[in-house]
Amino acid sequence: AVPLVIAVSTALAAKSGFLIRDRSAFERAKDLTAVVFDKTGTLTTGVFGVTDILAFGGAAEDDVVRATASVEAHSEHPIARGVVRSAEERGIALLPVERFRAIPGVGVEGTVGGRSVRVVGPGYLAESGIDAGDGRIQALQRQGKTVVFLLEDDRLTGALALADIIRPESGEAIRRLKEMGVRCMMLTGDNRDVAAWVAGELGLDEFFAGVLPHEKAEKIREVQRRYRVAMVGDGINDAPALVEADLGIAIGAGTDVAVESADIVLVRSDPRDAAAVIDLAKKTYRKML
Ligand code: ADP
Ligand code: MG
């Protein structure tokens, strides 16, 4: 038989906007000591807009946007969507792309008009030994903007800065969890300066930046040496981390992968509901003792 208190909580859970896929996971939620949030799409809306266009070596801004957007048009990544929307807004027609390839956590590449075109993050640039040599870039990153770089035939010809918006509910979610004594962390593939800005805005206890998609589950295992961990994510790049955590919480109606990888699914895209789940579990099982 299902204990009454759990039956009541399950009904309450449905009313509160979350679905419990695994009853034992809900029970585990009472013992959590840390929550790791994905950044893009979870603590932030994941809707990027282009804020700055940098053109190097005499390139024209529109050409930088055209080349970047042409390749990104073949990607589903939130950064790609932002770049393509920006080209549309500027009335820039895109060029055909051959041999498109997406490199998860790194960027995209393809051939445009016989030239190799890559759009990559700062990590790739550093590894290739290319120095952007432009002080504006770090200044943009320190404002929380994600900067991607355009390489044409391995030459740096431009960069775009994109801004995503912190969800207005994220700060309160973190405050509530910290009040419960739960440590709050963030995991992202984005640059350290960008992550530090978001972590500062939200009062996060810790963050991990520049983590490649295949390293995210490993990072969770590391945190598990110190804490009982919930991972909250939208399933874009973080499904294995959702599986690895003591409790996987998928945010929003998000992706199917997220729903399948999670123990608990939040109906809305509101990180406060993750705090509510944990609060409800702690209260439910306290009452049973
Ligand atoms: P997150 O952990 O924030 O979801 P990802 O792992 O998807 O981030 O991406 C990490 C970084 O990889 C991005 O901040 C960006 O620098 C680079 N990147 C990934 N995909 C793309 C893309 N389509 N275009 C440009 N850069 C990309
Ligand atoms: Mg995400």
Image (cartoon, rainbow, N blue to C red):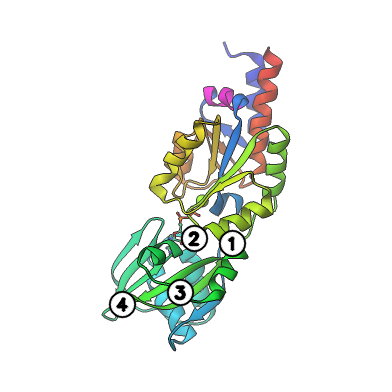
Q: Name the mark nearer the viewer: 2 or 4.
A: 4
Callout 1: SS? loop
Is residue 183 depicted above or below 214 in this figure? above
Q: Is residue 252 visible?
A: no
Q: Which of disc 2 and disc 3 is earlier in sequence?
A: 2
Select label 4 or label 3 by which is in front.
Answer: 3
- Amino acid of disc 1: Asp
| Marks 2 and 1, how far apart at CA | 9 Å
Q: Vertical placement of 80 versus 158: above or below?
A: above
- Report if the CB atoms under discs 4 and 3 are less than 8 Å apart: no
Q: Classify mark 4: residues with Cα within 10 Å, few (<14), some (14-19) or many (20+).
A: few
The numbered disc on residue 89 is none
Q: Are marks 3 and 2 in contact (CB under 8 Å)?
A: no
Residue 132 disc label: 3
Amino acid, disc 4: Asp
- Mark closer to the chain start, 3 or 1: 3
Residue to which mark 2 is pinned: 78
Classify 10 Å Cα crowding around label 3: few (below 14), some (14-19), many (20 and above).
some
Mark toward the start of the polypeptide (4 vs 3): 3
Location of mark 4 (residue): 153
Marks 1 and 4 in Cβ contact (< 8 Å): no
- Gap between marks 4 and 3 measured at Cα: 16 Å
Q: Quadrant of residue 176?
A: top right
Q: Which residues are magenta?
A: 24-29
Provide the secondary structure element on which disc 4 rests.
loop
Q: Quadrant of the C terminus?
A: top right
Q: Amino acid at mark 3?
A: Ala
Magenta stretch: includes residue 26: yes
